[in-house]
Image: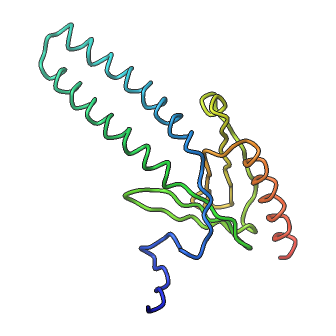
Amino acid sequence: MPPAAPAGPLEPWPDTVLWQSISTDLIWVELLRLSAMVAVVSLALGVGWAVTGSWPFGVALGAFLLLAVWRAVAVVRAVRAWGYAERENDLLVRHGLLVRRLSIVPYSRMQFVDVSAGPLERAFDLATVQLHTAAAASDARVPGLRPAEASRLRDRLTALGQDQAEGL
């Protein structure tokens, strides 16, 4: 067998990296958020249809519900596409289905690391780690982590960032 070719720019998930996945409980958080939005918009379109009797409201409601089902399927696949990997000098974060994105954040470029958890995330015992750099375009986030893992990652990234900055 010939050796595998190195990953190119269109293959952003290097096979040589040990990827850590995020919790699949994030699927439920995202589906609940989607459900809340679907309920509000469906109610508005349903009331518009009931009050006016105009068929475009019914068509819009049907199309919106079809789009919501498609989005629910996409949420499940999108959450499973998230991953992160800690390397010696940088953190890799991958996500995306149609547009696959690989962010590489050098530890020496990190300015600070946030850990946050909204009400739904807390209900499912999840947190998000947000890395901030001087360039806003190079910020990265890792959602769907257990709080203990988020704290461990935050502390490790902070320590590695300080070590790398001292070496400059």
165 or 100, which lies in front? 100
Q: Is residue 36 above or below residue 50?
A: below
Query: Which quadrant of the figure contains the N terminus?
Result: bottom left
Q: Could you say which quadrant of the image residue 51 lies in? A: top left
Left or right: residue 164 versus residue 37 is right
Horizontal and vertical percent for residue 5? 46, 86
Q: Determine the residue located farthest toward the bottom in the rendered image.
A: 2
The type of colouring in the image is rainbow
Left or right: residue 4 versus residue 40 is right
Horizontal and vertical percent for residue 155? 82, 54
What residue lies at 67% left-to-right and 31% top-to-bottom? 122
Q: Determine the residue located farthest toward the top in the rendered image.
A: 51
Left or right: residue 20 versus residue 15 is right
Horizontal and vertical percent for residue 55? 12, 19
What residue lies at 53% left-to-right and 74% top-to-bottom? 14
Q: Is residue 55 above or below residue 19?
A: above
What residue lies at 75% left-to-right and 58% top-to-bottom? 111
Query: Which quadrant of the figure contains the C terminus?
Result: bottom right
Q: Is residue 156 above or below residue 67?
A: below
Q: How many marks?
A: 0
Q: Could you say which quadrant of the image residue 15 lies in? A: bottom right
Q: Determine the residue located farthest toward the front in the rendered image.
A: 1
What residue lies at 57% left-to-right and 59% top-to-bottom? 137
Horizontal and vertical percent for residue 40? 38, 20
56 or 12, which lies in front? 12
